[in-house]
Image (cartoon, rainbow, N blue to C red):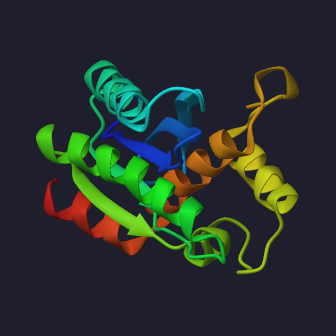
């Protein structure tokens, strides 16, 4: 563990695939990836079963890594209302898990995440991956395979670099 390190749980919510990662930061832009992966649910299962899978896995990660806080992407409303509703339901069980485990939640829009990582709100997935890879010193053999996993790392880094996180750290030192 880094000196005075704090762990951040990053979540990119989705019903089919939820990106989830845990990074550790000393608050000095020194990051270490502790976990990065995805929760993937099967379409053929009932909605409530899929939500229980997401909830249970998030609880396992919280129990194992004991994060200081959770950073999650806000819902982006596109033209597909069904997708937004499904993401909202997955997001809801993640927020429930955080609340039950008494973990502070911070929310970021996709624009805020892109600006924090790349410095440009219209950054592409490839630009985000490039910067996350550089910031976390990820080599090709340990690269996440899914975009959702990359996005969860970006959300965690966004929070680590945010004034919300740094102010909270200062108050608790």
Q: Within the image, what quadrant is residue 105 found in?
A: bottom left
Front in this rendered view, residue 168 or 50: 50
Q: Nearer the viewer, residue 83 or 55?
A: 83
Q: Position of residue 150 (x, y in %)?
A: 68, 44
Which quadrant of the view contains residue 136?
top right
Q: Residue at x 40, y 26 (%)?
A: 53
Name the residue rendered at 76%, 23% in the picture.
142
Q: Is residue 125 above or below residue 134?
A: below
Q: Is residue 59 left or right of residue 156?
A: left
Q: Position of residue 98 (x, y in %)?
A: 23, 44
23 horizontally vs 138: left or right: left
Vertical arrangement, residue 63 with respect to residue 163, above or below: above
Viewer-proximal residue among 169 and 89: 89
In-front residue for pair 96/124? 96
Where's the N terminus, which quadrant? top left
* Numbered circles on residues, count: 0
Q: Position of residue 149 (x, y in %)?
A: 64, 39
Q: Considering only vertical position in the picture, is 23 above or below 143?
A: below
Which x, y percent locates residue 93? 31, 44
- At x 81%, y 59%, the residue is 125
Q: Looking at the picture, does residue 28 appear above or below residue 133?
A: below
Instruction: Name which residue lies at 87% across and 28% down.
Output: 140
Left or right of 26, for residue 39: right
Q: Left or right of 2: which side holds 64? A: left
């Amino acid at each position: 563990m880094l000196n005075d390190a704090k762990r951040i749980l990053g979540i990119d919510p989705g019903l089919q695939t939820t990106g989830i990662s845990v990074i550790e930061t000393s608050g000095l832009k020194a990051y270490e990836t502790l976990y990065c992966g995805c929760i993937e649910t099967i379409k053929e299962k009932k909605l409530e079963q899929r939500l229980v899978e997401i909830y249970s896995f998030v609880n396992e990660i919280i129990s194992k890594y004991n994060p200081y806080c959770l950073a999650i992407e806000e819902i982006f409303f596109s033209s597909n209302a069904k997708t937004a509703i499904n993401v909202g339901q997955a997001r809801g069980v993640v927020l429930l898990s955080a609340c039950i485990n008494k973990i502070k939640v911070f929310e970021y829009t996709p624009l805020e995440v892109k600006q924090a990582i790349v410095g440009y709100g219209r950054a592409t997935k490839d630009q985000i991956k490039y910067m996350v890879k550089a910031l976390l010193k990820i080599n090709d053999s340990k690269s996440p395979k899914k975009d959702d996993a990359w996005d969860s790392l970006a959300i965690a880094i966004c929070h680590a670099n945010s004034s919300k996180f740094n102010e909270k750290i200062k108050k608790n030192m």
